[in-house]
Amino acid sequence: MSTAPPFEIDAEKERALELLRSSRRFLLVGHRRPDGDCIGSQGALARGLMSLGKEVHILNPDHPGPTFDYFYGDCPFGVYSGAALPEHDVCVLLDINELSRCGPMEEPLRAAPSKKLVIDHHPFAGEPWWDAAFVDVTASATGILVWYVLHELGATIDDVVAKAVFTALVTDTGWFRYSNTDAETMAVAAELIGRGVDPSVVFDSIHQRSPRTEPHALASLLARLEYFADGRLAVVDHPLNNGVAANLADSDPLLDILRAVGDVEVVLYVREIEPGMCKLSARSKTDYNVNALARRFGGGGHVKASGATIEGTLSEVRTRLIESALGDLTSEVSE
């Protein structure tokens, strides 16, 4: 592997690497509804550790779905069923830095005597709770950090690792369209392509296999679209009993349509996931910080892409979110 980290391997990162080198049994976990960066990071790290003779399990609160089956079938992915966790010395959290984002796995993981290692690129508010961390909030994706970890460990980079890391990069940068895309990202992507990754195959696998129900689901949700603040804020809500929209497995197509509107700066998609509980997906295409917005409601993420799970009815949660976002947008205008 020729790519070296563009940053210094400081004492904190070295502790993380030493934990990976010295331990034998690993459990890799991610967040609810794992996305391409989470799944790609897990698959790449698992394959790399296995090439070093380590015992590895991947366990997530939700199934990765068929979207990433072009590589995850070759990785030890599992879905948490409530049974005892696999025996492990180190639990590695990928693409998250809080156990609460593991849903039903949170308490079993807290109770496990294993060391906790975080590999992530999200901002963290609070005191570090983990045993070791390999974190860089300037990285475009967690997958790029896993790439550097594997480089430092001297792990084997096979076809599965290359496809997994490429998947992490393209999904978290929107195929290099988002503002987090940088020269480092493009350099790693170029090396992965040089190693045989075919971008067209990855693109088709992720984006060209939507079910025939998706256009109707998008139409149903777009019919609920409302604009606020002279079109700067776009809001779509998704009731639990909307049977057509229930077929929308991925919110990104909806969010991309709304972000494409010229006047829109902030998009809020509020989905009722069960009675009295809603899920927020927030996006920004300006300097508006949706991470700050999401954190007010117990969530988090990135400056331009964040989310939260919020208690309350859809109407209540929607109203609170709009008021909070409008307060920010109004203050920006006054300043």
Image: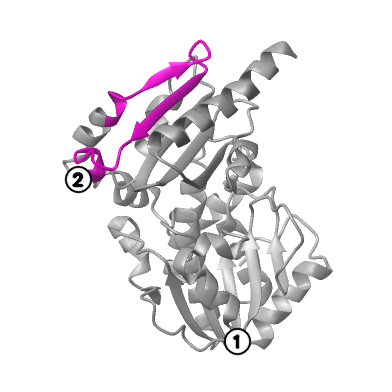
Instruction: Depth check: give the residue in front, 59 or 126.
Output: 126
Instruction: Quickly name the residue at label 2.
Output: 211
Cβ atoms at labels 2 and 1 below 8 Å apart: no
Total of numbered circles in the picture? Answer: 2
Q: Position of residue 107 (x, y in %)?
A: 53, 73
The residue stretch that appears in magenta = 221-247
Q: Is residue 259 above or below residue 116?
A: above
Q: Position of residue 240 (x, y in %)?
A: 29, 43
**What's the colour scheme?**
one colour
Residue depicted at x 38% and y 27%: 257
Q: Is residue 66 above or below residue 14?
A: above
Query: Is 226 part of what is drawn in magenta?
Result: yes
Work out which residue is located at the far right of the displayed protein and give it.
11
Q: Position of residue 216 (x, y in %)?
A: 19, 33
- Indicate left or right for 236 with 190 as reference: left
Instruction: Quickly name the residue at label 1.
Output: 89
Task: Tell me the SS state at disc 2.
Answer: loop
Query: Is 57 part of what is drawn in magenta?
Result: no
Q: Is residue 40 above or below residue 207?
A: below
Q: Position of residue 28 (x, y in %)?
A: 52, 73
Q: CA distance from mark 2 to mark 1?
A: 40 Å
Residue depicted at x 16% and y 41%: 212
| Residue 234 in view | yes
| Location of residue 133 by image quarter | bottom right
Instruction: Depth check: give the residue in front, 307 or 253.
Output: 307
The three-letter amino acid code for the residue at tag 1 is Asp
Instruction: Depth check: give the residue in front, 321 or 97.
Output: 321
